[in-house]
Image (cartoon, helix red, strand yellow):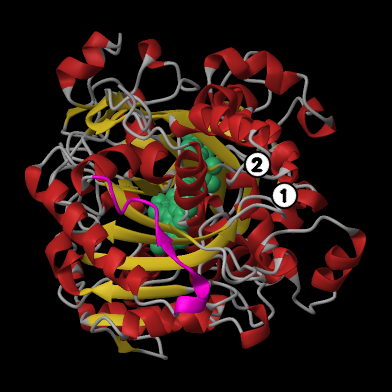
Amino acid sequence: MKMFPNNALLVAVVSLVRTVNVDVSGIHAHYAAAVTAAQGQGQGTGVADRTTRAGARDFGGKRQLKKSKNSSRSKSSKSSKSSKSLTRRPLVGGDKDIPTEADFVIVGGGTAGCVLAARLCSGLPNHKTVLLERGSPRSDDEEFIVNALRKTYDIYEGLLPDDSDLFNYFPTEPNPSLSDLETGAPGRKIGLIEGASIGGSSNVAFQWSYPLNGTVESWGINGLNSEIAHRINKRVEGVIGIEQPPPELRHDYTQDLVDAFLLNNHTLKDKLSPGEGGNTIGVNFIPGDEKGRRRSSYTSYLKPVLAGVCKDSLTVIQDVTATKLFPASDDNKRINGVEYVLTSKPDLTEPYTIKARLETIVSSGMYGSPKLLQLSGIGPANLLQSNGINKILADLPVGQKTQLRPIAVALGYYTGRQLDSVSNRTTLNDKTRKQFLAGKGGPYGKSITATLGKSDTKGYHTGGFGKLGSEGEPYLTLGCFLNPVGFGNFSISDGADPFADPIVHSNMLSDPADFTAAIECVENLQKVMKSFPSDFGMVDTAANIPVANWVSATCTTSWHFVGGCAAGSVVDGHLKVKGGLSNLRVIDSSVIPKLPTSGGVLASTYMLAEFASDILINEYRSVKKQTNKSKSKKGKK
Ligand SMILES: Cc1cc2nc3c(=O)[nH]c(=O)nc-3n(C[C@H](O)[C@H](O)[C@H](O)COP(=O)(O)OP(=O)(O)OC[C@H]3O[C@@H](n4cnc5c(N)ncnc54)[C@H](O)[C@@H]3O)c2cc1C
């Protein structure tokens, strides 16, 4: 039995889930078939090129394209990559020697890692900090992709080939609560993405939103409350610049979308309102400048200090993957440092080691941090032993209570108005590229979604307009980012191969409360859709489909994943790893025990890294002061 026999619908769903910043995983194959059929029916040849490309990116295709990167199978393909991979030694910034010791060793130069490295090296200039990042230094083209918001997005959508090293992809395990779009069969997988070069996921994230007041208090982090978080948020905003795109860089029909929400009991907010809930709507904010150029944690925090204030106190090593944390000795619980190998040549090198005199800080991200802990023997003893890890350093519930954010979606198509294909889609030509590089905005600099709003504690929502190819039908896409109550879990796989994908049971929507919330949200968004001016000729694609079926077949994720090294169970209130271990902290999104209420993870991760930097700087400055005092006392005696 086919649940959704309408080919146009399948095409529309794919467009929808892409435009709301989600992955379509299992839908891609149907998408390809649907568009091919549509072409046969004369529904627009303009999609042909894109069909071929996007069709190649069904889940299998996507894995072939990119997956190879992070899997053991990929090692040979990595080796055959461009000149970047020809190195036989770690790529040490500033042409320094490969360091074997430092005061702080930070593993992972992502969102949190770049903030921490920049803050520690400038706040503690007499200490040595080393930052290890698995990605290679970015090429000019990759740098361009990062800065140009829409270009990254077109890669997600499969409109452009992904031959960059910016992302890693891998699938979740089959989820019985999610069904196949065409057949209705349960067990749909979702495609996960993580950032994989310096700047991490901040290179590829789009929306800036804070959680509701009262959220951070529940994370179990000593001294953190909403007031302090807002103060730090302001500091972060000052560094990276959070802007509403100016009118000429906004998504088409932004105002029509805002108006449709206003007709449905929403209040307009035209300022960043950290912590506030309410049924609000506003123009989307982006972590970038007024020209629509993205700012990542690398471009805003790390790059400016590298050659300047931190020239001597910070060393950045790229193209290295940490494989294990090591203790001082077999019977000692002090973590002494990190073993790592070359990412591009994992088979060709003996592991390098670096010793952390003061602290090893794991900032390897949502999947990377729980993975590194488990690989090192820190995790559930049974699970680790079943993966061949017999030396258990600490029996802790690493990865046992995780959350992946569901997005429930609503979709409309319309024929009454035209969408400017240049403004809402990338056009790859020299003129637009030059325009963007000159700081004049242009298609590469357009925001990705038009609006961002809150539905109190239920979640938050976005919307925007897209088009399937330059000639395809235009669609309105609305998405509700839910605050789930259910949890999933995470573990290493493949006998503890550090390059194998992890196993993620997302359990998304398996809690009935989450399923109900998704249905309610879609029903609300459908009302918004009905409020569009009649000249749009808006049609709700799912008007005749039971909402529960629609949700199960189309619900996907925003790639927000937290809880792998949750505060409270894995790390303590000072972000120190529990289980009797010492000199080891985890500082990144993986310590957030539950998805931020009605806010993304990006802003919270920046805030958390800044907060933790303050703690470390104060702690080690005061250690120094005390040492100096006792030295001078001794001197006087
Ligand atoms: C595609 C995508 C879109 C998103 N969109 C949004 C959004 O619009 N709004 C929002 O609020 N949130 C968004 N998020 C979520 C948000 O970006 C992340 O939750 C947040 O950036 C995570 O920060 P982090 O520091 O924990 O990890 P990351 O920023 O991912 O950094 C981890 C770093 O560690 C490195 N690393 C990993 N393992 C190792 C190892 N073994 N050795 C050395 N280095 C290693 C990685 O290469 C990476 O650079 C998105 C996430 C993704 C993936």
Q: Which x, y percent locates residue 282? A: 40, 82
Q: What's the amino acid at mark 2?
A: Gln
Q: What's the amino acid at mark 1?
A: Gly
Residue under circle 2?
318
Q: Which x, y percent locates residue 576? A: 24, 50
Mark 1 touches mark 2? (CB < 8 Å): yes
Q: Tell me if 230 is positioned left or right of 197 in this view.
A: left
Residue under circle 1?
93
For the point 47% across and 52% down, the residue is 16
Vertical relation: 409 (above or below) 580: below
For the point 74% across and 42% down, the residue is 45
Instruction: Assign a secondary structure to mark 2.
Output: strand
Residue at disc 1, CB closer than 8 Å to ligand 1: no
Quadrant that contains the N terminus: top left
Hey, which quadrant is residue 324 in on the image?
Answer: top left
Q: Which x, y percent locates residue 121? A: 54, 64
* Sequence-first disc among 1 and 2: 1
469 or 45: nearer the eye? Answer: 45
Vertical relation: 28 (above or below) 405: above
342 or 536: nearer the eye? Answer: 536
Magenta span covers which residues? 534-545
Rounded to the nearest whole Å, what is the CA distance between mark 1 and mark 2?
Answer: 8 Å
Vertical relation: 197 (above or below) 77: below
Q: Residue furthest front?
A: 41
